[in-house]
Amino acid sequence: MRSIAIVLGAAVLLAACGGATTQPSPAPAAPTAAPTTAQPTVAATTAAPAPTPAAKLTFTAALKTENEVPPIANDEKSASGKATFTLDLTRDAAGKITAAKASIDATFGGLPGTALIHIGHLHGPAAAGVNAGVKIPFKADADVPLVLTAGATTFKKADITVEAGLAQEIIDKPGDYYVNFHSRLNAGGVVRGQLVKG
């Protein structure tokens, strides 16, 4: 009986102290976010559109008798002039020239009243001081010379067909081509000037 009382007393004591010690169960761990890896930022790279190639290009030439090869030394040596040579271009989607037309606008002065300017061309390729063959005829009707007024005259012509490859060569190296007007007295040319872009 006494042992029962001891057992009961021990049970009461344990109950008073909270019973058997149990380890608290761990709280569920909070879910951890997946580690973020920095994504490389790709800069928006939009290629700048290619510039549209010019459809019209203008060149000038200072026409002088001393530019002829050989320089003019006779009665027409005081002649001079200026020419504007223009290319009107047609290009494909890639910018390549597919067709071209030329125009020429020239003025002359300092000519003697007897001068007869009768033909004109674009020659090349040749640097200053070197002669070359005709590439584009401007004025081919040699039997109809330009009319002079007080030693001056003008000449204009448009819509001259130019081969596409030649047009590109002129654009690439205008200084290799020259405007040359010829007179009856100076059949090889009386005033000449190399092309300059602009």
Image (cartoon, grey):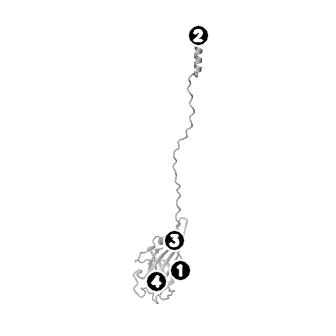
Mark identifier at residue 164: 3
Sequence-wise, the earlier of marks 1 and 4 is 1
Mark 3 and mark 4: Cα distance apart in space: 26 Å
Measure how far apart labels 2 and 1 are at the Cα level: 142 Å
Could you tell me the amino acid type at mark 3? Ala
Pointer 2: residues within 10 angstroms few (<14), some, or many (20+)? few
Is 66 on the left or on the right of 94, as rendered?
left
Asked which secondary structure carries label 3, the reply is helix
Asked if marks 2 and 4 touch (Cβ < 8 Å), the reply is: no
Residue 13 shown left or right of residue 72 in the figure: right
Q: Tag count in the figure?
A: 4
Tell me whether circle 2 and circle 1 mark residues in contact (CB < 8 Å). Answer: no
Number of the front mark, 2 or 1: 2
Camera-side residue: 34 or 21?
21
Splitting the image into 4 quarters, where does residue 23 fall? top right
Residue marked by disc 4: 182
Marks 2 and 3 sit apart, C-alpha to C-alpha, by 128 Å
| 2 or 1: tag closer to the N-terminus | 2
Q: Amino acid at mark 4?
A: His
77, above or below 6, in the image: below
Which badge, 1 or 3, comes first in the chain's sequence? 1
Mark 2 vs 4, N-terminal side: 2
Residue at 58% x, 11% y is 3
Q: Which mark is residue 2?
A: 2
Give the Cα separation between the discs numbered 2 and 4.
Answer: 151 Å
Asked if residue 182 shows in the view, the reply is yes
Determine the CA span between mark 1 and mark 4.
16 Å
